[in-house]
Amino acid sequence: MSDEPQQQSGDPGNGNRTPRDLSAGAGAPAGQAAAPDGKKGGTGRPRRTGWRRAVPTWRAALATLLVIALILIGGFVAGYQLVGIPPANPTATAQSNVYLYKDGTVIARDGDVNRQNVQLAQVPLPVQHAVLAAEDRNFYSERAVDIKAMFRAGWNTLTGKGRQGGSTITQQFVKNYYLGQEQTVIRKIKEFFIAIKLNREVSKDHIFEGYLNTSYFGRNAYGIQAAAQAYYGKDIGDITTAEGAYLASLLNAPSAYDVVVHPENKAAAVARWHYVLDGMVKENWLSASERATMQFPVPDKVKRSTGLSGQRGYIVQAVKDYLTTHQIIDEKTLATGGYRITTTLEKKKQNALVEAVDDNVMSQTSDDRTADRNVRVGGASIDPANGRVVAMYGGIDYTKQYVNNATRRDYQVGSTFKPFVFTSAVANGSRTQDGRRITPNTVYDGTNRRMVQGPNGPTGYAPANEDDVSYGPITVRMATDKSVNAVYAQMAEDVGPDIVKQTAIDLGIPKNTPDLTASPSIALGTATASVLDMTGAYATLANHGRRTAYTLVDKVSKDGQDLTLPDRSTEQAVSREAADTTTAILQSVVENGSGTAAQGAGRPAAGKTGTAEEDKAAWFAGYTPDLATVIAVMGQDPDTGVQEPLYGALGLSRVNGGGAPAQTWAQYTGAALQGTSVQNFDLTLERGAEEPYLPTDEATEPTDTPFAPPSDTQPSSPANPPNPPTDIEPAIPPDTPTGPPDSEFTDGGDNGDFDDFFPRGVGGARRDPASTPVPNPLPAPNRP
């Protein structure tokens, strides 16, 4: 216990401590009086009064800054961790497929977004510099985000100096490619963190390339390639420095700076253009002397939308079908867009074909004739030397008639198929039943509705000739001129329908063509090959029997990378003699037969007319040495889609292949080949194919009995065995003089007056697959 006296206190909790003097200053120690002026006594600090009390002390300020810094750092770390690089925005990756003529001119685009991505290396360096001078001159040296620029832009916007851009190219690319254009705080925060991350993970070139491909330039052009086409009608690789500076200027105000659409804004656009060029000089990307010589490059007029109207839709669909059918691109991959497809179509020839159809068919229709509403036209043209499709006509307008009349396979080809029968006969050394080799001069029975005779007698098939005309004895050449069904049905049986079918396939008719059946009726064109299929087959004949499968595509690329196209080899589908001899008799069709209207082309030509059953389609298929073209006029009810006869259409009682189709062919061919040298046919004919000459006593075709058509009801036995050796000759009466052993007569040729000489059994089938045609030793006839 302490010896010190205890002090009393009124406060039991305070023990014996002396009470505090309440009169002293609140901040003074007990027992010490406060200074009269309110200041602390001794070493005390002055008390903060008045306005000073609102100002934080340096300690408080420092603490606040530290707290803010911690929050920002924490927020940055959290944001960096939480905000990842998202998948690309679907609109940013959406591209259109661009379809081009052979010369690079745009035919059509088939997507909603007009964009074609290019690699950075495809953009000329001066154009790259122009964009950098316009948008971000320090792009390659700066960080992903320019904080100072962001605050400056924000301040300028707040102070009424106009909306300012403070984003780097990296930030703009992030906005275009990963996010969207909405102006929200959340989007800006995401943009900030994605830009930082992206800058650490990919190269500057990658970011810049993406920026160029995603930026909007006006005129519905997304990306610099689309912009180059929209404003100057050329690829970005062909853009000049001055043009590139204008395109770069557009990034600041795409629509406003289009001096064609908004001529009132030209002064502002030109000022921006100067700003870009001056920036390039300042950054040493452009010499001052070159800069001084530049003139403002006024852009092209705004092109109308390259949608799918007119022929464009037909072309796009045909090219798509070609790409997918040949397994170059599958349908789903093609639908992702971004493909640049250069077709084989030539703009001059395409325009000429459209004009020819308009002049000879569509302009001849009238709203006053019911039949004219059923008129459809299909056309295709191929270069025989390489199989490239140079022109195609699908219909009046894809947006009105969406079925492509050039590629559809539902109309009979009619007599345009007959040349394939003759080609097959020559290629296979076929003979009649009595052993005569089939040549242009072979005599057949052209009697209307004559029963086709097979190796074992009547076949039960008796086709009618057009208009039920009977021709009696007639040569193959004349039967081709007049398109005699009785002759060609019998010839198909003589050759063998299965062999005829294979020859047609070899020439280019697809093996899965509807109604391509191995029967005598195959000769009459019951098959429904497309116009394009038929053009390919006739191109093989024009190319001396060498077939190169047709193509619609020259090149396909995406993002600057070319796709591999299938090899397209050329093969000898049929012998040259077979193809050339067919050409010779088809020349006669144009000179003397049903195709004389084709002479209007002013070129040596070969061709064949054709009519589908019930006149539902009229065809002309023909070629010059350097161009094969097929035109078909078809009848179809626009409401029901049912095929209809063409009776009364175009103001005619009937439409046949020698009319509007041949006239269209002639006008197109003349225009398509205008300016090129005239090519004559160079033909190597089979033996016995020369023009017939008058018979002599030394060289006539013998006959045992006068001509009498075989019975249509009683089966008959063939005059000769089904497969005789090649040297078997027809029976010759002892008193009939014969020619020399190597004459046309002894080789089974048909020279002579067929009114006086017609071998018994003509029309009976006999083919000799083992025989081979002998090359023609005589010079080919030159035809005008």
Image (cartoon, rainbow, N blue to C red):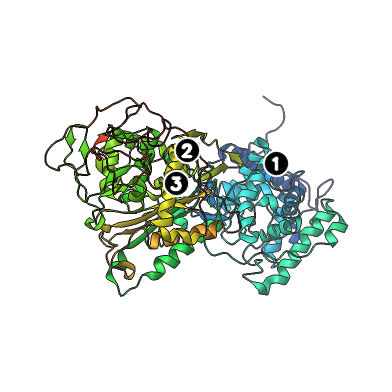
Outermost residue to the front: 735
Q: Residue at x 76, y 67 (%)?
A: 271
Which quarter of the figure is the N terminus placed in? top right
How much space separates mark 2 and mark 1, taking CA atoms? 51 Å
Q: What element carries label 2?
A: strand
Is residue 258 shown above or below 59?
A: below
**Image coordinates for residue 376, horizontal then vertical, percent:** 35, 60
Quadrant of residue 379 within the rendered picture:
bottom left
Closer to us: 560 or 82: 560
Q: Which residue is drawn at 49% across and 55% down?
A: 112
> Mark 3 or mark 1: which is in front?
3
Q: What residue type is labelled 2?
A: Arg
Which residue in the protein does label 2 denote? 547
Labels 3 and 2: the sequence-earlier one: 2
User: Which mark, residue 565?
Assistant: none
Which residue in the protein does label 3 denote? 584
User: Which mark, residue 204?
Assistant: 1
Q: Are the two marked residues, 3 and 2, in contact with CB atoms closer than 8 angstroms?
A: no
Q: Which amino acid does label 1 sit on?
A: Lys
**Image coordinates for residue 115, horizontal then vertical, percent:** 56, 52
Q: Could you tell whether 6 is left or right of 460 in the image?
A: right
> Mark 2 or mark 1: which is in front?
2
Labels 3 and 1: the sequence-earlier one: 1
**Image coordinates for residue 167, horizontal then vertical, percent:** 68, 52
Closer to us: 695 or 737: 737
Q: Could you tell whether 755 is left or right of 220 in the image?
A: left
Q: Is mark 1 on a helix, strand or loop?
A: helix
Labels 2 and 1: the sequence-earlier one: 1
Q: What element carries label 3?
A: helix
The answer to whether any part of residue 769 appears in the image is: yes
Quadrant of residue 731 within the rendered picture:
top left
Q: Could you tell whether 426 is left or right of 209 in the image?
A: left
